[in-house]
Amino acid sequence: MTKIVRASAPSKIILTGEHSVVYGQPALVMAIDKKAFTKVERTKTITDPFIQITTQNYNTSVSIPFSTGPEFFKNQLVHLHPLLHIIQTIYIKEGLNDSLKIDIHSEVPKGAGLGSSAAVCVSLSTALTSVFDLDYSLEDISNLSFKGEKIIHGTPSGVDNTVATFGGCMKFQQGNIKRVRSSAIQLIIGNTGISRETKKWVSKVRTRYESYPEVIDPTFEAMGSLTQEAEKFLANGDLEKLGEIFDINQGLLSTIGVSIPKLDHLINIARTAGAYGAKLTGAGGGGCMFALVDKNNQHPVFRALQKNGIEPIIVNFESQGTKSEILSEIPSLNPQKSKKSGVAVLSSSFTRLTASSMIRSAIS
């Protein structure tokens, strides 16, 4: 007797406000249509349940008794530890005792600053609540996923799992996350292929700020003003103005020292090919850049980046967040009256979610 469910969750891109958000300024983060997918097969078991996890992106497949516990994953399979933690949280809270086969794959490049880990955590959380017919709201899904994000990143802001859960575009400032309006923009992402440590570049900016506060503080304030302007142009679909905002923001990011020659090169290529604007996204020092395009300039920008050894990725604004579907179900699997999962329908009433509330929920 089995039930099989598949769930998905979008990744994200930071449009404006990198680094300045650490100093109290707003940032815009948008869900994009590159997603993580999780398929979960639930099987009734009489003895101890087993957990089989296959992750295509890490080329890993492991099957162990659930009683093995998290230490095995923490010490031997570090990249799976956050996933087991999410599974254990649900099993302990709900008193579950079934075996699971979990298959995860993602369209999102790892370590590129596009929220790959959050998308995986959210898609897993959604699949689990659906396969067990649990009445979890979208906020519950986000809080559960945040537990996995904390294992991966230590002290994450909560933005990535929120965007992956609810979709759309969010403004983040001083711990508050608010949904904002967005037109259906299109971006082309170019990955430098250079790995970077976010903590290193945040520390570098801190050093520059402490050395030249009278210069850097106004720079952060300017970034905050750009985010406010970008919010307006994002809502009304003014691509030319939005592109100008991205270009100015890139100049300020160079000022604080987080752009590198490879990023500058790709950005200049995109601009020369006709992009409305282009900038780095994330911590800088490597990772990705993006160019704002539409159907009129998409092809030349794509080809220009491709000719320079980059494999560009075309992404679109994703208004929907996580969702699930039942692939197979035997009604007799659960003799009790099933509950409808709260993740199948997006919450239209969602307007604001604070990081502090997510942290309190994660601890409790």
Image (cartoon, rainbow, N blue to C red):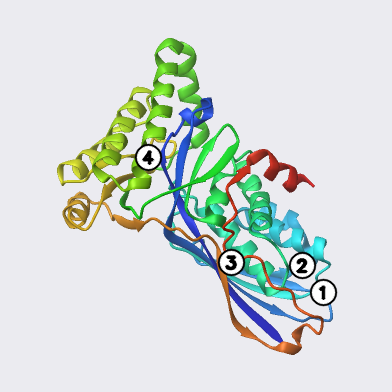
Q: Which mark is residue 48?
A: 1
Q: Name the residue nearer the viewer: 120 or 15.
A: 15
Q: x%, y% of residue 327?
A: 57, 82
> Which residue was labeled with disc 4?
232
State if disc 3 and disc 4 touch (CB < 8 Å): no
SS state under label 3 = loop
Kind of residue sitting beneath label 2: Phe
Q: x%, y% of residue 23?
A: 52, 25
Q: Residues within 10 Å of mark 4 (few under 14, many from 20)?
A: some
Q: Name the residue nearer the viewer: 78 or 164.
A: 164
Q: Residues within 10 Å of mark 2 (few under 14, many from 20)?
A: many
State if disc 1 and disc 3 touch (CB < 8 Å): no
State which mark lies toward you, 3 or 1: 3
Q: Earlier in the sequence, mark 3 or mark 1?
A: 1
Instruction: State the image quarter where residue 336 is shown.
Output: bottom right
State which mark lies toward you, 2 or 4: 4
SS state under label 1 = loop
| Quadrant of the rendering where the N terminus is positioned | bottom right
Q: Earlier in the sequence, mark 4 or mark 1?
A: 1
Q: x%, y% of residue 260?
A: 32, 32
Kind of residue sitting beneath label 4: Lys
State if disc 1 and disc 2 touch (CB < 8 Å): yes
Q: CA distance from mark 2 to mark 4?
A: 50 Å
State which mark lies toward you, 4 or 1: 4
Instruction: State the image quarter where residue 299 is shown.
Output: bottom left
Q: Is residue 117 visible?
A: yes
> Which residue was labeled with disc 3?
345
SS state under label 4 = helix
- Numbered circles on residues, count: 4
Kind of residue sitting beneath label 3: Val
In this picture, residue 164 sits left or right of residue 129: left
